[in-house]
Each structure stands twice: as structure tokens, then as C-alpha cells.
């Protein structure tokens, strides 16, 4: 495959840097500094004279007073150096309500200097302003000035606004600071934002995803194009009386691209996009979630037309009154508010609600009815063509080698979703970079698939020779039976290198095509492949180990499903198990229910399960006994090479057995040309340690 590169966006295409919101803090700090400096410097340029000293100076300034005694001496308290200020000749005296101001002549004497030095000489007289605090009710000072014939004037009454200007500015700064702090505290998780919605708003220019970025789910994309068309041209539908679905519910397994689809709808329609999770509504305080729902729809109405996307809707919309763990009044009130907002008396127009979940069986029926979530879109696992398209999308950013066959990679990743395929491509790129390669090759992609399926290789784990030999025969039994039986997937790889947490070895089978049904013969063949490991140990070592624990568990579960679910037993075609198992989650999601059959039927079910397992064991013993030479040869090859592929396995079996593809006693059973493949990614069996 030729190298493919995706052109990087130019600097002009990048999103602009959001404006800095710290300018408010800078402005507040600047004003605070100005006020502080104004307050500090306000009185530093004036000489402060005490009231008693001022009265003495006025008395000595009387023209009738003796000229040689018309001054006063006060200590300079504004300097660290001990100085004496000689003050005389008060001028331009103004009587204010709270202070007396004017000018005086000042001479400075440095008493700390040595007598006769230059520092000890008095400075030249200078005219400086002065001020003295005055009591508001004081009335005798004007009489004193008149008595000693000192001219004065009465200052104008100061403005009340100017008088309180500094206090008002400080109050305004504190008020502005409080508003800013409250707005900052109003974010998600804040105790000040109980009733506010936590939805994150994406503007039109912030959403870059389109339907071109979505691959492998063409049916879901076609369903959502109508929603996009309505958001672009609503008049086209409204003039005919049509009504666009108010809600679109995306249902599917995890990792299939439900969130990406919702963003692509908003990106194609060019409308605002509110994104949040169902858990963002639920709090411990009753009524908080309902308030957040109302606030979210109020914000959406202001941005209409727009899209609200709620991820993991099952956290909010579980069936009311179900008695499930986690149900409480707060969640139910929040759900009630959502139901009313979506289809109540005040239903919102121009607001489309999209939601995603992988647990639709837990949702409340009132939430799923027409008028709320009108349209249910299944976003299922992609088929082989879809996986190929998804791989092509992710490989656009990767430098790939000429040996990469995307179709082959898509064929060996049956059951993988988009997130799995993206992880495989990323793992392959990391492996190529770790090995200093110039491009990603097929070797890295195969290794990435195996890492995702079986786990990381543990080549440094030290195993005893007898344990290693036992694992080799165990995996050889799996591979030989899978190769010999009809209706089985081809063996892709056999290894005795430990992988993952517990697998000491593994046999990996890969389907050639996607399959959606399984016959009784295919299920029986799968059980026999799972039992082959422990039977091989029994034949060779006359003893079994604990390494077949996972194999026995899976074989028993298949046999029990044949009896209880599929009607493939002597008990008839009856279903004995009422299952609420989630169709999209492989584990969990199943609630315990009371048994619907008697104890005698339960015993018969157990006997049928045991019969199917015992018949499988007998058949596997017969296969391995007839193929003992191939079993030994495969084990020897594994001891020498540790890993063998499908071609090597085929060569060994053909050299060791005359007719390896036909099981003795089953010559009439044709080898199927189309192996089975279900929704799982692969069928691998392995020995596990305790």
C-alpha cells in the first residue's frame, strides 16, 4: 500500500486563541494601587502642624509682636534624622470645616550634626503648604486670627460626592470583585451553581467533525441526514405539516462512534452543540437535577436551532419504580423534568435532543415513546467493509508501508468497533517508532491486533521446561482439533509465549467472513476445540493441570446455552432461561430472576450439559489418538520456535498425517468453506495459570 499522508492545517485554519479573561483582575489591581498611592501620598506634600503650635504661631505673627520672636520651633517627625523646623509668616490661611490650610515659611536645622559643620547650618527659608485638623464645631480660631490681624478666608463647602469619592470607589471595587468571584465560582462542581446546567456549549466554528469523518455506519448516517436537513431548511418540512423528531436516541455497543455521530450532525448543520453526560444532572440534593434540566433547555432556547447531546442517558433515564440499586427521588424528579421539557405544555421548538446509551433495556418507557425520542438509531459493530473504511480513515494520519493490506486487517478484526480499530492503528504506529522503522508495516498491525485480543507478550517470564512442554502439548491439542474438525475457524497463530494476565499460551482462530448465525454442529465443534487442550495433557502426561480452567468455563457455558437458550438438546426446543442480558455489553447488565422451572428440570439440564461435554471429550480423544504423530510434531515445533503460523501448522499436520482434514468416523462431513464468525473479535483458546 502506498504511503498516505493527511495534509496538516495551515496556521490560518487554526482556531483563534480565546481572549484572556484576566483583564478584569488587572484592572482591579491597577485601581487598587492608584487608590492606595493616592491615600498614602495625599498628606505627604503638606506640613502637619498641631493645633496648639498653630495657635502659638498665629499669636507670634501679630504685626504688633516683637519681630525677633515671630516664629516657632517644632520637631520634624517625618524624617529619621533629628531636625528642628523653624516656622513663621503664615499666609493665605483658609478655614475649612475639618481643617485649616495655608502656607508658611520653613527653615530646617540639623541638630544631629556637629556644630560648625555644613550640615549644622540652617537651610534657606522656603514656602511650604501646611494643614491642621480642626474640629467641626470649633469657632474660636477665627476670632484668634482677627485679634492678631492675620488675614484669612473661609474655604468653600466641599462636595458631598467628592468627600465620599474614595469610600465609594473602594466599595465599587469590592462589589466588582465579589461579582467576578461569584461568576467564577458558578462553574461545574461549584457550591454556588446547584441549579445551573453543566452543559458545555460548542459554537458553530468549534465543531470540525462532519459525516466525512464517520465511516462504517452508513445506515446510521443516512438516518441522521434528515435531522441535518431540517436544521438547515426547516421550512421545507413545516410547509407540508411535517414535524421533525424531537429526540434521536443512538443505541449501540461502546466505542462504535455514537458521540462522533452527534458531533458530525452539529458540524454538518452548523448549529450550536450542547454536550453533557447523564450523570451531570444527578446530585444528592433533591431538586437540583430538575433545576439543571430546566436551565439547560432555557439556554438551548436562546441558541435555537441547536442540538443537546446527552451521553450515557441510562444514568438519568432508568425506569422509575424499578427497585434497582441506585434509584432515588432525585433521579426520578430529574427524569420527570426531562420528560416535561421534551414533550410538555411548554415544549421547545428548534431544540433537538440527541442521546446515546448502550443499555436501552434500562430506560423508562415514557422516555422512549414517540414525541420524545421519536427515532432510535442503531450504531452497531461494523462489518468487514465498514472496518476497512474505518481503518482507511485512521491510516490517513499514519505513514504506512507498501506491504500493508487494509482488507486483510479488516478481515482478521471481526467484532472490533471503531475505537478498537483506532487503538490498533495507534499501537502499530508506536511499535514502528519503537523499532526505528520509517513506516508502519503489516507486522506491526498484526502485533497490534494480537495485543488487543490476547494482551502484551511476556517474553521475559521464566517457565520450567516441564511446564513449557505441557503448555506446548496443550496448545497443540487446540490447534490440531481446530484444524481437523469441520465448521471451525481457521487457525491463525499458535504460541507458547505468555500473554496478558494469565495466558501461558494461546491458539488464535480468525474467521474469514462475518457470520451472524451458528448451527448446532458449529457449537459442538467449538466445545471440542476448547476441550482439546486438557485432553492432550491427559493423553501425553496421563494427568491434567489447572491451565484448562478458562477453557472448561467457556465450553460449559456454550453447552448450557445450547440446552437452555437454543433448544439444542434432548429436552426439546424449549427456552429455560429468561435473560435480561444487555445485547451490547459482553459482561454484566444481567439481572437475577427467579427460576421458571422445577428442580427436577434443573437436574435434567445439568445432565444434558454434562452429556454434551462428555460426548465432546470422547470425540476429541479419538481425534488426538488418531493424530498422535501430528500432536507430537506440533509440540516439538512449538518448543523450538515458540510461535507457528497457519502455514507452518498446515505443513506439519500434512507431513504427519495422511488425511489431516478429515476426522476418522466423519468422512461424510464436508469441510465448510465458510468458517463461522460471530460478533466476537476472534476465537482463541489458551492455557491459563493459577
Image: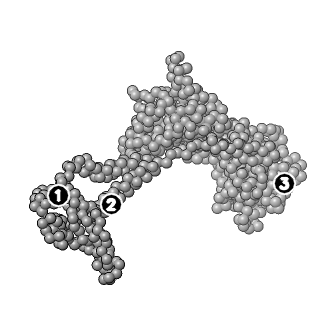
Q: State the mark number for residue 151.
A: 1
User: Do the CB atoms of the residues marked 2 and 1 lie less than 8 Å apart?
Assistant: no
- Asked if disc 3 and disc 1 are in contact, CB closer than 8 Å, the reply is no
Q: Position of residue 532 (x, y in %)?
A: 74, 52
Q: Position of residue 300 (x, y in %)?
A: 46, 34
Looking at the image, tell me whether mark 2 or mark 1 is earlier in sequence order.
2
How far apart marks 2 and 1 lie (CA) works out to: 29 Å
Count neighbours of disc 3 (C-alpha within 10 A) and say few if under 14, some if 14 to 19, many if 20 or more.
many
- Looking at the image, which residue is at 74% across and 54% down? 432
- Residue 682 against residue 433 in the figure, above or below: above
Secondary element at tag 1: loop
Q: Within 10 angstroms of label 2, few (less than 14), some, or many (20 or more) residues?
A: few
Q: Nearer the viewer, mark 2 or mark 3?
A: 2
Does residue 295 appear in the picture of this structure? yes
> Could you give the CA–CA distance between mark 3 and mark 1, rounded to whole angstroms?
130 Å
Give the spatial CA distance, label 2 vs label 3. Answer: 101 Å
Helix, strand or loop at label 3? It is helix
Residue 56 quadrant: bottom left
Q: Left of 116 or right of it: where is 385?
A: right
Q: Nearer the viewer, residue 493 or 85?
A: 85
The outermost residue toward the top is: 240
Residue 12 x, y percent position in the rendering: 63, 41
Identify residue for label 3: 630
User: On the rendered image, what quadrant is the C terminus found in?
Assistant: bottom right
- Vertical order, 344 against 615 (above or below): above
Above or below, comparing residue 313 to residue 452 in the picture: above
Residue under the point 18% across and 72% down: 68
| In the image: residue 602, left or right of residue 468 | left
Residue at mark 2: 41
Element marked by disc 2:
helix
Amino acid at each position: 500500500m502506498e504511503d498516505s499522508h493527511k495534509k496538516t492545517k495551515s496556521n490560518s485554519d487554526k482556531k483563534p486563541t480565546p481572549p484572556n479573561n484576566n483583564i478584569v483582575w488587572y484592572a482591579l489591581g491597577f485601581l487598587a494601587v492608584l487608590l492606595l498611592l493616592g491615600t498614602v501620598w495625599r498628606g505627604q506634600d503638606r506640613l502637619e502642624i498641631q493645633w496648639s503650635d498653630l495657635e502659638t504661631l498665629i499669636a507670634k505673627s501679630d504685626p504688633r509682636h516683637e519681630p525677633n520672636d515671630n516664629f516657632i520651633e517644632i520637631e520634624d517627625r517625618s524624617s529619621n534624622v533629628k531636625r528642628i523646623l523653624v516656622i513663621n509668616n503664615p499666609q493665605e490661611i483658609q478655614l475649612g470645616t475639618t481643617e485649616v490650610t495655608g502656607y508658611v515659611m520653613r527653615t530646617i536645622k540639623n541638630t544631629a550634626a556637629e556644630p560648625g559643620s555644613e550640615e549644622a547650618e540652617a537651610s534657606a527659608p522656603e514656602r511650604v503648604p501646611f494643614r491642621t485638623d480642626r474640629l467641626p464645631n470649633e469657632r474660636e480660631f477665627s476670632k484668634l486670627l482677627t485679634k492678631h490681624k492675620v488675614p484669612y478666608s473661609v474655604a468653600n463647602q466641599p462636595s458631598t460626592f467628592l468627600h465620599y469619592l474614595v469610600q465609594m470607589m473602594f466599595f465599587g471595587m469590592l462589589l466588582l470583585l465579589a461579582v467576578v468571584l461569584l461568576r467564577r465560582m458558578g462553574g461545574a462542581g461549584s457550591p454556588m451553581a446547584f441549579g445551573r446546567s453543566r452543559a458545555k456549549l460548542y459554537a458553530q466554528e468549534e465543531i470540525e467533525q462532519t459525516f466525512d469523518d464517520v465511516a462504517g455506519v452508513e445506515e446510521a448516517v443516512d438516518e441522521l441526514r434528515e435531522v441535518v436537513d431540517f436544521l438547515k431548511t426547516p421550512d421545507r418540512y413545516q410547509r407540508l405539516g411535517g414535524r421533525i423528531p424531537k429526540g434521536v436516541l443512538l443505541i449501540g455497543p461502546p466505542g462504535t462512534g455514537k458521540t462522533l455521530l452527534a458531533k458530525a450532525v452539529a458540524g454538518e448543520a452548523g448549529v450550536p452543540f450542547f454536550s453533557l453526560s447523564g450523570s451531570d444532572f444527578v446530585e444528592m440534593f433533591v431538586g437540583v437535577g430538575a433545576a439543571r434540566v430546566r436551565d439547560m433547555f432555557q439556554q438551548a432556547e436562546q441558541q435555537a436551532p441547536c442540538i443537546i447531546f446527552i451521553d450515557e442517558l441510562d444514568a438519568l433515564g432508568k425506569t422509575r419504580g424499578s427497585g434497582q440499586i441506585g434509584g432515588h427521588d432525585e433521579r426520578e424528579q430529574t427524569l420527570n423534568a426531562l420528560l416535561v421539557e421534551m414533550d410538555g405544555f411548554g415544549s421547545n421548538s428548534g431544540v433537538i435532543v440527541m442521546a446515546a446509551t448502550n443499555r436501552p433495556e434500562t430506560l423508562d418507557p415514557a422516555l422512549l415513546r414517540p414525541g420524545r425520542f421519536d427515532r432510535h438509531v442503531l450504531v452497531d459493530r461494523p462489518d468487514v467493509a465498514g472496518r476497512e473504511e474505518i481503518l482507511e480513515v485512521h491510516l490517513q494520519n499514519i505513514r504506512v508501508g507498501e506491504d500493508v493490506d487494509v482488507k486483510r486487517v479488516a478481515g482478521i478484526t471481526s467484532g472490533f468497533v471503531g475505537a478498537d480499530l483506532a487503538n490498533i492503528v495507534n499501537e502499530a504506529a508506536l511499535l514502528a517508532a519503537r523499532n526505528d522503522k520509517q513506516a508502519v508495516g503489516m507486522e506491526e498491525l498484526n502485533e497490534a491486533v494480537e495485543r488487543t485480543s490476547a494482551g502484551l507478550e511476556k517474553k521475559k517470564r521464566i517457565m520450567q521446561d516441564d511446564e513449557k512442554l505441557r503448555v506446548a502439548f496443550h496448545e497443540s491439542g487446540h490447534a490440531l482439533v481446530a484444524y481437523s474438525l469441520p465448521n471451525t475457524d481457521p487457525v491463525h497463530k499458535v504460541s507458547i509465549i505468555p500473554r496478558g494476565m494469565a495466558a501461558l499460551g494461546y491458539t488464535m482462530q480468525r474467521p474469514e467472513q462475518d457470520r451472524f448465525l451458528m448451527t448446532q454442529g458449529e457449537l459442538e465443534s467449538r466445545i471440542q476445540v476448547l476441550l482439546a487442550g486438557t485432553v492432550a495433557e491427559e493423553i501425553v502426561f496421563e494427568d491434567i493441570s489447572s491451565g484448562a480452567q478458562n477453557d472448561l468455563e467457556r465450553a460449559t457455558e456454550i453447552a448450557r446455552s445450547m440446552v437452555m437458550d437454543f433448544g439444542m438438546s434432548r429436552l426439546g426446543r424449549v427456552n429455560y432461561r429468561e435473560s435480561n442480558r444487555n445485547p451490547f455489553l459482553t459482561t454484566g447488565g444481567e439481572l437475577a430472576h427467579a427460576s421458571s422451572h422445577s428442580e427436577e428440570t434443573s437436574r435434567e439440564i445439568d445432565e444434558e450439559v454434562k452429556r454434551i461435554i462428555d460426548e465432546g471429550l470422547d470425540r476429541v480423544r479419538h481425534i488426538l489418538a488418531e493424530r498422535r504423530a501430528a500432536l507430537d510434531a506440533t509440540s516439538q515445533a512449538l518448543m523450538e520456535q515458540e510461535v507457528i503460523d497457519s502455514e507452518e501448522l498446515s505443513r506439519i499436520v500434512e507431513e504427519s498425517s495422511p488425511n489431516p482434514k478429515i476426522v476418522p468416523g466423519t468422512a461424510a462431513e464436508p469441510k465448510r468453506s465458510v468458517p463461522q464468525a460471530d460478533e466476537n473479535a476472534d476465537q482463541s483458546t489458551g492455557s491459563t495459570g493459577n
